[in-house]
Image (cartoon, rainbow, N blue to C red):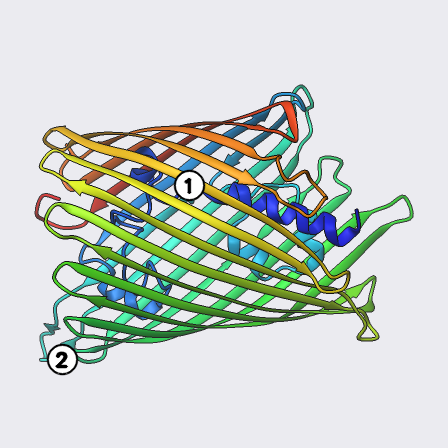
Amino acid sequence: MSKCNIILVSFIFVLLFNMGYPGDVRFSGMGNLSLIFQDDFHKLDLYDFAGISAGFLKNDSISFVGLRASGLKELWEKDSLTYLTIGQAIPQRLTDYAPVEAVSFYEVIPQFNLVPCELIYVSRQIEESYGYFGNVSKPQAWGVYAGYSQLNRGFVDVEESDVIKTPSLAIVYSKSISDNFAFGLSVDGFLGAFTSADKQDKISLTPFGVGSGISYNNETVSLGLNIDYHYPMFTYTHTWEEGEFKERFNGHALSPLFGAVVKFSRITWASALDYKWVSLGGSYDGNDIGGLKINSFSVKTQILCEPSFVRITGFVEHDYKKPVYTDNTDNIWFETAYKNYTFGGGAGMVLDIAKVGIEGLYKSIRAEDKLSEETLRSSDMSIKLGAELGLIKNFFIRAGYNYGQFDPDLDDIIDADDCIITNTLTSGLGINFLRNTRIDLAYNYKWAKTDLDPEEKITDHIISLYLKYALISESY
């Protein structure tokens, strides 16, 4: 198999592990549902759904401090391979701004889409206020998200392991301009740092960025526009007996985002469009090695209908990414187009003491190697069931089940009949006994088998925690 095919196959397997877990502890307990119901980090609004900083003002009405975290242990029984993960050690943004070398290097490490580990502080002033001298303070909101994640990959009874550490910081601010307009500012950055078990390979990727946006809001329609700028810095260091050699990339990334939300009494329709342009220049041991340009976009839309106690939703998303890597003479040696289509839907009910739901997701994945004119395809399907029961006031129990089937139909590289079957049992608790305080706990047990290696058994243990303390005088 060619180098490009290895990268493409591995990229597809990374996508397999990237589906199935929402970034919300409550939903992780009730079947990993992420479409039917809304919660703190899953709202159909300009901020959560579209990523528009100006939408942060309307995102919620409560000031709070919070902590959310997750941990995972995955064991590959036959290979004695283990993954120990805290939070999202390889967030999607890391590979968004990475050169091809980084994608191929991280290829064998799954992107576990877990609840981030972060401390959160959010301050909101919803009403217009007046100072002692009559000065007017417009409604405003700002938030700080300080996170840390780590992943260890190693083998049972082996002391050393590969390690990825990812500290992060994000700040968002939004303020009302008038009754219908608001603007937003954001600053974010993280450091993805990889160290191999033998300490010979080290990788760091640091995209620092700023953003600004504006939104228009009335009772029915919300529109938002945002522009982000990042400066990615990538360094790959390899230590030989002869010495240390470094490969570096740095450059610029621009990302305009557009979002729209339409709300009627029983229907909410949210849409978002995100485009990314990345241009990086590279050097090896001080010599020019060419550059990388990435063009990508993502468009998604979701409709949620809430007639009476019933919930019905539909979801569609299309992702496109095309990295082009040239050498120092502008010859193209890597050009691949990744095209993903996701279709989802679900139905649920909200009763006095219970919430129940079912969701289905289907993902079509396509990778086109432009140089060798080869196309690799795969598909991923999942069914999710979940429920939340409030047996007594302010105490909730949650449970769910997921079934997944991943079919790597890769044009004679892997047999078409081979597939990976996954099963996941979920459980959780919600506790609101303490004044102004919310506590969510979740545990998932996942097991998988593959026709590619029937003797291999993969098991996951996933725990998640969310603590929220509302900074208000009333009971929360």
| Mark 2, other Cα within 10 Å: few <14 / some 14–19 / many ≥20 | few
Which of disc 1 and disc 2 is earlier in sequence?
1
Q: Position of residue 257 (x, y in %)?
A: 42, 71
> Between residues 149 and 35, which one lies in front from this camera angle?
35
Q: Position of residue 384 (x, y in %)?
A: 35, 37
Q: Residue at x 63, y 59 (%)?
A: 98
Which residue is situated farthest in the front direction here? 417
Q: Residue at x 91, y 48 (%)?
A: 242
| Front disc: 2 or 1 | 1
> Between residues 96 and 465, which one lies in front from this camera angle?
96
Q: Position of residue 328 (x, y in %)?
A: 82, 72
Report if residue 141 is visible in the image: no
Establish if 257 lies above or below 248: below
Secondary structure beneath label 2: loop
Q: Say whether residue 317 is left or right of residue 288.
A: left
Query: In the picture, residue 299 is in which quadrant?
Result: bottom left
How far, Cα to Cα, is label 2 from label 1? 47 Å
- Disc 2 marks a residue whose amino acid type is Asn
Q: Residue at x 12, y 38 (%)?
A: 351
Query: In the picture, residue 132 is in which quadrant?
Result: bottom left
Q: How many marks?
A: 2
Q: Quadrant of the C terminus?
A: top left
Q: Position of residue 138 (x, y in %)?
A: 18, 74
Report if residue 84 is visible in the image: yes
Q: Residue at x 65, y 65 (%)?
A: 323
Residue at which label 1 appears = 21
Residue at which label 2 appears = 135
